[in-house]
């Protein structure tokens, strides 16, 4: 009946001698293939109580991931995606009324009352979503054996760390790209590290009315609420980290321009964190993620950076442990002294020096912490860093604050602009992004502690820190990438053992007096959300050119 309808004649084809409707997204208005009783791509006659709406449902293709999504628009919810093999039937989300369909699952659809129209989906050629995921789209998460609870389609492993791994993924109901960080190695203090990272990120970004654009948000959190053996967080997928960006031969900007943009944007993030008395304690190239954006003029690109990986973060009044990556550590962190927000200022300065590769710093290694801090202090005296050398004062009480640094840089940096993302699918977080995400409560934390044989109180008094790249940092490294020397792993005169093609972290037990982050008083100052600091004019030649002293306020 549908095949023979005159309105569908242009789409009739044959597969293995059987009549079929041949559909593609080429040249379609709004990139949608609509199905309904009138004014649709495919006409479905409303016969015999079929209950077909004027526009009953539609297919659309997510251009960034290649995922094809079926959306139900019928008020009676009579569009169904399913599979003959129950293990590959993923139901629609009740909230979104949509689901991804592929050549490996949801290979059938039914439309109308009592499944009046039934179709088998047959795919022609390569499947774009497979190319995006770099593997067949037939593994689901968080629990592959229960497709009714599937939240995403698993993609390639992007990085591995001491507590888990990060995968590329596609949201199974929207087709959007995302990164999924799974904490599964939670023995010892691992669950405390994971929960602290999650709650601190939620506090600073996702659940904060004044969330900051330069801090990576969490889109959602799920965990094993039966056996308490794993936790997953969903985050926007970014192009890479500062570490990988510097390695790219075809990047849009020079080292100096990147250093300037990182400095200004991260200073703003640290200013925001300081208002919540939060110390990151692991600021470095690999924990700053980026996406390429284009200025409103459509000509000049820039990089939008976001701070990630908060598993070592803490409130400054409680931070006293040796935590982070030694080359980037502030002296007070290395010496296990009380740490304030200015510890991150030192680390940001070292990150800028690394980006700049001043005096060959990317390959520099030191025999001890004293030699390292003397090297940093000496570098700060160079005229290139004249206007930010107070970031590298060894006495933290004399070091410039993030607030002072932002005020100094504001209006002089071509670093934080409003604009359009070039990779729109990667920066369109969609799916109710930035909605409220529940914190992991003390009761849940205690359940994880019970599973791994330690009390919550004891665990909070002793934590683990990861040397080198943590899971979030590694997610932007290509599979199989090896660090070329010990410095690149953030170690001083230490050797990394690689168990496989991915670098793994060394776990170090450390004493601490830190607990979970608690809510702070509402930030009443004019910080994120206004966007004023991000909207500088980049149209002038002076702004676009690389200055001789890109860190200068002149």
Image: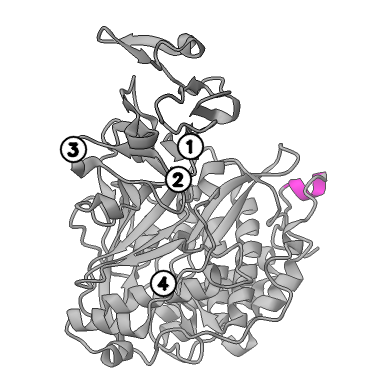
The answer to whether the residues at label 3 and label 4 have Cβ atoms under 8 Å apart is no
Rendering coords of residue 420 (x, y %): 66, 45
The answer to whether the residues at label 2 and label 3 have Cβ atoms under 8 Å apart is no
Marks 1/2: CA–CA distance: 8 Å
Marks 2/4: CA–CA distance: 24 Å
* Quadrant in which the N terminus is drawn: top left
Query: Taking 106 as reference, is 189 above or below it?
Result: below
Q: Secondary structure under badge 3?
A: loop
Label 1 neighbour load within 10 Å: few <14, some 14-19, many 20+: some
Mark 1 lies on residue: 62
Q: Nearer the viewer, mark 1 or mark 2?
A: 2
Q: Which mark is residue 174?
A: 2
Magenta stretch: dominant SS? helix
Q: Earlier in the sequence, mark 1 or mark 2?
A: 1
Nearer to me, 119 or 324: 119
Which residue is painted at 30% across and 70% down in the image?
A: 493
Marks 4/1: CA–CA distance: 29 Å
The answer to whether the residues at label 1 and label 2 have Cβ atoms under 8 Å apart is yes
Q: Earlier in the sequence, mark 2 or mark 4?
A: 2
Q: Earlier in the sequence, mark 3 or mark 4?
A: 3
Label 4 neighbour load within 10 Å: few <14, some 14-19, many 20+: many
Mark 4 lies on residue: 198
Which residue is painted at 58% across and 46% down in the image?
A: 292
Rendering coords of residue 256 (x, y %): 63, 53
Q: Earlier in the sequence, mark 1 or mark 3?
A: 1
Label 2 neighbour load within 10 Å: few <14, some 14-19, many 20+: many
Q: Nearer the viewer, mark 4 or mark 1?
A: 1
Mark 3 lies on residue: 85
The answer to whether the residues at label 2 and label 4 have Cβ atoms under 8 Å apart is no
First to last magenta residue range = 541-545
Nearer to me, 111 or 340: 111
């Amino acid at each position: 009946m549908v095949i023979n309808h005159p309105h569908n004649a242009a789409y009739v084809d044959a597969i293995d001698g059987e009549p079929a409707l041949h559909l593609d997204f080429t040249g379609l208005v709004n990139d949608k293939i609509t199905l309904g009783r009138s004014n649709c791509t495919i006409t479905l006659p409303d016969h015999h109580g079929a209950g077909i709406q004027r526009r009953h449902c539609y297919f659309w293709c997510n251009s960034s991931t290649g995922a094809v999504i079926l959306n139900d628009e019928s008020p009676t919810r009579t569009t169904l995606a399913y599979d003959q093999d129950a293990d590959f039937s993923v139901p629609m989300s009740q909230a979104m009324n949509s689901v991804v369909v592929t050549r490996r699952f949801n290979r059938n659809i039914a439309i109308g009352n009592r499944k009046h129209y039934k179709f088998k989906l047959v795919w022609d050629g390569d499947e774009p979503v497979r190319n995006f995921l770099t593997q067949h789209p037939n593994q689901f998460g968080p629990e592959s054996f229960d497709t009714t609870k599937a939240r995403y389609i698993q993609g390639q492993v992007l990085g591995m760390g001491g507590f888990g791994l990060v995968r590329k993924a596609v949201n199974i109901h929207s087709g959007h790209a995302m990164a999924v960080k799974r904490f599964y190695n939670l023995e010892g203090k691992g669950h405390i590290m994971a929960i602290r990272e999650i709650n601190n990120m939620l506090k600073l970004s996702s659940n904060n009315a004044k969330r900051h654009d330069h801090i990576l948000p969490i889109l959602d959190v799920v965990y094993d609420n039966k056996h308490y053996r794993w936790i997953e967080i969903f985050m926007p997928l970014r192009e890479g980290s500062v570490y990988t960006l510097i390695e790219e031969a075809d990047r849009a900007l020079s080292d100096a321009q990147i250093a300037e943009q990182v400095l200004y944007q991260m200073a703003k993030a640290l200013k925001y964190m300081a208002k919540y008395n939060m110390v990151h304690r692991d600021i470095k190239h690999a924990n700053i993620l980026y996406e390429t954006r284009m200025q409103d003029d459509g000509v000049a690109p820039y990089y939008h950076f976001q701070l990630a990986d908060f598993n070592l973060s803490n409130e400054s009044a409680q931070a006293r442990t040796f935590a982070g990556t030694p080359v980037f550590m502030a002296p007070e962190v290395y010496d296990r002294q009380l740490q304030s927000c200015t510890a991150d200022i030192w680390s940001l300065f070292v990150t800028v020096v690394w980006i700049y590769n001043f005096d060959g710093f990317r390959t520099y290694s030191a025999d001890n912490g004293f030699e390292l801090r003397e090297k940093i202090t000496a570098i700060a005296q160079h005229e290139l860093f004249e206007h930010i050398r107070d970031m590298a004062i060894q006495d933290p009480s004399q070091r410039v604050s993030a607030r002072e640094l932002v005020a100094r840089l504001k209006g002089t940096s071509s670093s934080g602009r409003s604009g359009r993302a070039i990779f729109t699918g990667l920066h369109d977080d969609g799916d109710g992004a930035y909605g409220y995400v529940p914190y992991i409560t003390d009761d849940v934390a205690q359940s994880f502690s019970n599973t791994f044989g330690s009390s919550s109180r004891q665990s909070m008094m002793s934590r683990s820190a990861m040397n080198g790249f943590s899971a979030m940092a590694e997610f932007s490294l290509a599979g199989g990438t090896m660090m070329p020397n010990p410095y690149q792993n953030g170690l001083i005169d230490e050797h990394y053992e690689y168990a496989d093609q991915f670098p793994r972290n060394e776990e170090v037990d450390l004493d601490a007096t830190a607990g979970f982050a608690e809510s702070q008083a509402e930030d009443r100052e004019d910080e994120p959300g206004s966007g004023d600091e991000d909207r500088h004019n980049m149209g002038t030649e002076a702004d676009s050119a690389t200055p001789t002293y890109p860190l200068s306020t002149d």
